[in-house]
Amino acid sequence: MALLEVKHLKTYFYTDDGVAKAVDDVSYTVDRKQTLGVVGESGCGKSVTALSIMRLIPNPPGKIVGGEIVFDGRDLLKLSEDEMRSIRGNKIGMIFQEPMTSLNPVFTVGDQIEESILLHQKVSKEEAKKRAIEMLQKVGIPAPEQRYGEYPHQLSGGMRQRVMIAIALACNPDILIADEPTTALDVTVQAQILELIASLQESLGMGVIIITHDLGVIAEHADNVVVMYASHVVEYSTADEIYFNPMHPYTVGLLGSIPKLNVESERLMTIEGTVPVPTNYPVGCNFAARCPYATEECIAQEPVLIEHESGHWVACHHWQDVKAKRPEHLVEA
Amino acid sequence: MRGIALDSNIKVKNDTPRSLWYYSWKRLKRNKLAMAGFYVTILIILVALFAGLLAPADPNLQILEYSTKSSGFRGNMLLRTNDIPGQGPVPIPIQSYEVKGNDVFYVSDEGNSLHIPISKLAGSSSSQWHVEPLYVLGTDRYGRDVLSRLIYGARVSLTVAFFSELLSIVVGVFLGALAGFYRGWVDEVINWLTNVFWSIPTILLVIAISIALGLGFIQTVVAIGITGWPDMTRIVRGQFFSLRETEYVEATRALGLGSLRTIFRHVLPNAIGPIIVIATAGFATAIIYEASLSFLGLGVQPPTSTWGQMIYDGYGYIAAGTNWGLTIFPALAIMLAVFAFNLFGDGLRDAFDPKLKR
Amino acid sequence: MIQFTIRRFFYSILIIFGVMSVIFFVMNLLPDPARMMQGQRADLSTQAAIRHELGLDLPVWQRYVSFLTKTASGDLGRSFSSNRPVWDSIKERLPATAILTISAMVIATILGIGIGIISAVKSNSLLDNTSRVFALVGISVPSFVFGLLMIIAFGSLLQIFPISGYIIQDDSKWYAFWAYHWEYLALPMITLALRPISIIARVTRSSMMDVLTSDYIRTAKAKGLTTRKVILHHALRNALNPVVTTVGSWLASLLTGAFFIEYIFNWPGIGALGFDAIPRSDFPTIQGTVLFAAVVFVVINYVVDIVYALLDPKVKLSGSK
C-alpha cells in the first residue's frame, strides 16, 4: 500500500452560478522516494486536489464531498481538525506558486522557518534556530546565518522559493506537495529549484507531488504522471509511457505544445477550442468539443478511466486511434 | 528547460465580453442592502423635487395657537381671505362654528365668541373655508407643520449637498488629473496643498469659511464644496498614476495626441468608477456638514427650513424633557438620508472593486 | 530610519506653514472685525483705533508675516470678547479635551479592532452583517445628532447619566477624573467614539479580509498553525498597518468631533471654547482653536508615520538607505 492514496476524490464549490465540480472523481497514489507529476491547464482541478489533501479548501464555498485520502493508513478526511494540524507542515509539507507573496512580509525568514519547527517538534528556541539555519543551508542559500534575520522583501524570487522549501521541509515530512513551484520564476532559476527538490528528495527520501501546467517541467524528475483535464484524470501512467506512448488526445496536444530544440522551424501545436465551465460540464467527454477524434459516442457518453495497457490508464473511447495516428515526432525514442 | 506556459496557447473560456459597467451593475443588483439604499435615495430625491406637491401645508405658515402640538394633532380652522393681495388665506383656529345668515359665528381657539362675514372667508362653500388639517408629526414652536418642514428641508439638504459636491468634484478631479498626469513639481505642489487642506479639520474649515463668506445658500455651498476636494484629488491622482502606465495611454502619447485630450478622452473615463464612489461618500458627508452648519445657525438662513435648524430649535426642549419629536424627526431624516447614501455608496464601491471578482 | 524621521519632520513643518497660510487667507476674507467688535454703534475713530491696534491698517503681506512670526512664537492673539490671550484659554481647556478624546480613542480602538476582526473572520455571518450595518449607521449619524439622541435616551428618558459636563476642581489632578467622575464622561465619550469605532471596524474588517485571502496566510495554515494563531499572529500584524493610519488620523481629528460634542454636553474643553466664540464673532479664538486642531492633527500624523515605519520592515529599510 502506497504512502498516500487519493481515491475518487470529489471537491465541489458552491457558487452563485451553480455547483462547480472542481475535482470530480480523481485518484492517484504516491510513495516514498517517488515523484508524481500532476499536469493540466489552469482550472483543471490539480491545485484543488492538492489543497484537498492538505484540507485547506476554503469552506464556504468549497467542500470535499466524496472519496478518501489515505495517508499512512489513515483517511485524512476523517481526522479531527486538531489531528489534521499535526499532519500539515509536519508529515506533509507544501510549497506554492507565488514565492513573492507566500512569505509573510512582516516576519524574518528565520522566524518563519522556526515557527514550523517549534510547532511540531519539542525543541528549545536555540535548537530550533540551529535547525532553521541548517535548513537554509540545505536549500542552498548562501550565508544562512545572515539570511536568517532578513525579511522576505530582501530576497529574490528564487531565494524566496528556496525559503518556502525550507519551511515545507523543516519537519522532515513524508510528502512534499509542490504546487507550480517554478511558474513564477525565471527559466534558469526554474531548473535550479527543480534540481534542488530532486536532490533533497534523494537525501531525505520523501514522496513528491509536483503540480504543473508544463509537461516539460517534470520530464526529467517525475516517475509517474497524472494528466488532468476539466476536473477529471484523463491519463495516468509512468513518465516514459506518457511521453513516448500517450494515448489521450489531450496529452498529445500537451506534448505538441512543448517547444523542442532539435526540431527546427516547426510551429507549436495549440489545442483549439475552449475548456467547458466547471458548473456546466457536458454529458459526454469533457474534451469532446476540442478533440479531433471526437465522435457521436464521445458526446453521448463519458469515457471511464480504464487500464488499457499494463500500468497505463486512459479515459478515452478512441485511445487506439490516438495511439495509431500519433504525430511522428513523439515516437522518436 | 523545455517548458513554455501552456495556458497562453489555449483559448480560455469566455462569455461574450461586456463592459465593466455591465458587471458592476450586475454585482450591485445582487447586493440587497445597496439596492435598498439606492431606492431610499431615489425616494428622498423625489420627495425633494416634488416637495410642493407632497407637503400637506405651507412649511413657513405660523399658527401660534398651534404651538408645539404632538404628532397626530388635528387642527380646526376657518380660512380668511388675505388682505394682502397675492398671499394665501389666513387661518383662524377655532373650537367650533355655525353659519347664521351672512355671518359665521365661531368660538376661537382661546374660547372667545366671535363672528366674521362669509364674504371675508376664502372660497365659496364651507368645505373650502373650513378645514381640519392633520399634523402627522405635530407642530413646532411657531405652530408650523413639522412634516412639511421636513419635506422642504430635504430640498435644502440635497441641493446644498449636490452643488457643493459638484464643486468638490470639479476642483478635485482637475487638481488630481494635473498631479497625476504631469507629476514632478506640479504633483509635489498639489500633493502638498492636498495635505494642507486635509490637515485642517474639515468641519472647522467649513465653519471658518462660512463665517468669512457670510451666511446664505451660495456661501454654504462654497464653504462645503471648497473643503471636500482633497479626497477626490487623492483618488484621481492615484488612478492616473496607475492608468498612466497602461498601454493605451502610452499608445495615445506615441500617436502624438495632446496631453489634455489624452486626459479627457482616455484617462478620465477609466477613472470614473472610483470618482463616482468617492462622490457618493462625499455627498453623504456634505449632507452632514450642511446639517451641522445649520445646527450652528451658519447655514441657509431662516425662514427656509433645514434639518439642522429644526434640530437646533428642538434642542431647547430636551433639557425640559418635552417635545422630543422636534429633535428626533429631523434627526431621523438626516440619518436616513446619509445612511441610504452610504449604503448605496458602499455597494457601488464593492461593485466597482475588481478584487471581489475572486 | 533617522533620515526618514527628519525628512518627515520637515515636511510636517511645511504642512503647518500651509495650514497657517490657508487659515490666514480665510480669516482675511472676513468682514471687518473692528466693526463687528463694536457693533453698529461704533464711531469711525474708535474703529480706526481698533484697526490700528490690531494691525489691520497694514498691507496684507506685512500682516501675513507678522501673523506667521507671532503664531510661530505661540502668540495666537487676544480674544475679542474676554481680551485674554487665546493660547492661555486653550491651555486651560486642554485637560478636559484630552480626557474626553483619549478615553474615546481607547474605547474606539479596542472595540473597533475587535469588531473588525470578528467581522472578517466570520464574514457574511449574521454577526458580520449586523456589525457592518451598525458601523454604517455609525458613520451616517452626525455627532451632534447622536449626542442629542443619547441625551434623550440616557439622560432624559432613563436618567442613568448626567447630561452635562463637569468642572475641574483646582485641587484635584486632572487624571484623577477617570476614577471619580467617569459618569460625566460616559455619554460624551460614547458619542465621540461612535464614528471612530465604526470607521476602525470597517477598515480592520476590509484589511483583514484582504490579508486572510493572501498567499502567506495559506502558507501559515499549511504549516499546521491553529486558526487563532494564524489570525492573531500572521494576519493581524499585516492587517494593522492601515488600521494604525486610521486610528492616528481619527485621534488627530477627534478634536473636531469634540467641537460639537463638548458644546452639546457642556464639556469645558477646547471645542466648546471655539464653539462659544462663533456667535460672539470672536475671531482670534476661532482662528486659534482651528489652528491648534490642525497642528495637533499634523503632529499626530507625524507620530503615526513613524510608528507605521516601525511596524513595516519595508518602510524601515527604504528609509535608512
Image (spheres, coloured by chain):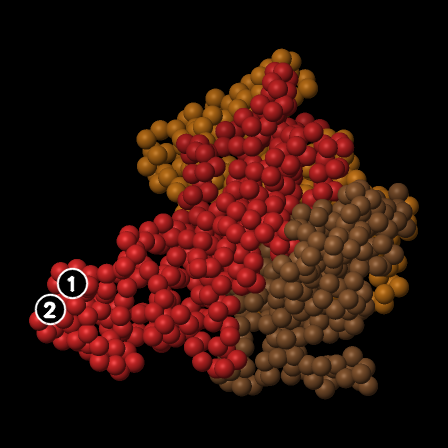
Chain colours: A orange, B red, C brown
Label 2 is found on which chain of the structure? B
For label 1, the SS is helix
Classify the position of the C terminus of chain C by image quarter: top right
Q: Is B352 left, or right, of C255 in this rendering?
A: left
Q: Position of residue C237 (x, y in %)?
A: 72, 59
Contact? badges 2 and 1 (CB < 8 Å): yes
Q: Position of residue A266 (x, y in %)?
A: 60, 15
First in sequence: mark 2 vs mark 1? 2
Between A22 and C182, the one nearer to me in the picture: C182
Q: Residues within 10 Å of mark 2 (few under 14, many from 20)?
A: few
User: On screen, B179 above or below C226?
Assistant: above
Chain letter for mark 1: B
| Residue under the point 58% across and 17% down | A267
- Residue denoted by label 2: B102
Q: Given the image, on which type of amino acid does mark 1 rest? A: Ser
Residue for point 61% across, 35% down: B174
Type of amino acid under label 2:
Asn
